Image (cartoon, rainbow, N blue to C red):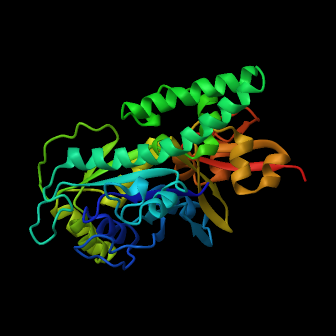
Amino acid sequence: MALTLGIVGLPNSGKSTLFQALTRKQVLIASYPFATIDPNKGIVPVPDDRLSSIAKVSQSKVVTPTTIEFVDIAGLVKGAASGEGLGNAFLGHIREVDAIVHVVREFKDHNVPHVHGKVDPKDDIAVIELELILADRTLVEKRFEALSAKLKTGEDRATRKTTELVLRVLEAFGKGVPARALALNKEERTELKDLHLLTLKPVLFVFNTDEENPSPSEEKNAMRINAKQEAELAELSQNEAKEYLTALGRIHSGLEELIRESYALLGLITFFTSGEKETRAWTVTYGVKAPEAAGVIHSDFERGFIRAEVANWKDFIAYGGETGVKQKGLWRLEGKEYGIRDGDVCYFRFSV
């Protein structure tokens, strides 16, 4: 599955700097609002040390990592939902992503003016959250009107149930509560899916800081990154970057940490296929059954699924690949109800 993350935030929050660091892509970075007009997009290979180790064992000719797409969306401002700035055009881009990376400014730099005149992370978060709620409310109100009209033509249990759900969402919006904060079950989320609600998308808050020991965040699903430092890191060679990270007392880059947090937020895992021709990483949702995971590779694999042959990646490496794990009795045959685990090395059998 292709994972897409939308990077949002107020103007001058450091979004474009972070995007450049993550994708190593040159974008316009300026200290004035709307320097970024159209969304910048960059596809990044997901770093995974397991992939190269598995490929080495299989002596693969090609090594293909899974990827993640970042979309740098122009800075939102107060009134975006009603068209301020470039308003609704920006919000439309957010509706297309799987999750939102909300960049919040913590750094202080007099040469980079804050759009509201002062650095206040809590207030900045509230501004963006409100704009997303207002944009969603317009959609939900239209759906409520349509459902109410349908109810007037006759009693319909399913329609009434959906109407009650939509009303519940509207009431939350009236209190300034995003849809993702509601205790919605799987069925209710499915009912709302076609609305593509912005506030129902998972959010990872990324505080752009210049402090070594900032105060802890009150937000759930939050992390801190020094975007300027990450941009400097992105300009270095692989060996130089490792040395720089060591000097900073860090093991992983901000990109690796952000991807790890994003995978956790969305409940994603990685499995592998490996052979002499290619070793490849694949992204699926935690708990996905073997046939559906096979379908990520090719729809024919899911339709004609027979079984999955599976080994743990550590065993695969330790015992020299497929032959070795078979000799150790660690090459398992799994059926349609098998839930793929992170790090599984899989071979799918299917019929045409």
Looking at the picture, tell me which residue is in the foreground, 259 or 20. 20
Q: Is residue 181 visible?
A: no
Q: How many marks on residues?
A: 0
Q: Position of residue 134 (x, y in %)?
A: 42, 45
Q: Position of residue 191 (x, y in %)?
A: 64, 34
x 43%, y 49%: residue = 262
Q: Is residue 269 left or right of residue 109?
A: right
Looking at the picture, tell me which residue is in the foreground, 161 or 333. 161
x 84%, y 49%: residue = 350
Q: Which residue of the protein is positioned furthest toward the left in this rendering?
A: 110
Q: Is residue 159 left or right of residue 247?
A: right
Q: Is residue 318 left or right of residue 206?
A: right
Looking at the picture, tell me which residue is in the foreground, 60 or 119. 119
x 40%, y 70%: residue = 23
x 55%, y 39%: residue = 140
Q: Position of residue 99 (x, y in %)?
A: 47, 50
Q: Position of residue 307 (x, y in %)?
A: 78, 41
Q: Which residue of the protein is positioned furthest toward the right in this rendering?
A: 352
Q: Quadrant of the N terminus?
A: bottom right
The vertical placement of 170 against 50, above or below, is: above
Q: Is residue 309 visible?
A: yes
The vertical placement of 38 against 69, above or below, is: below
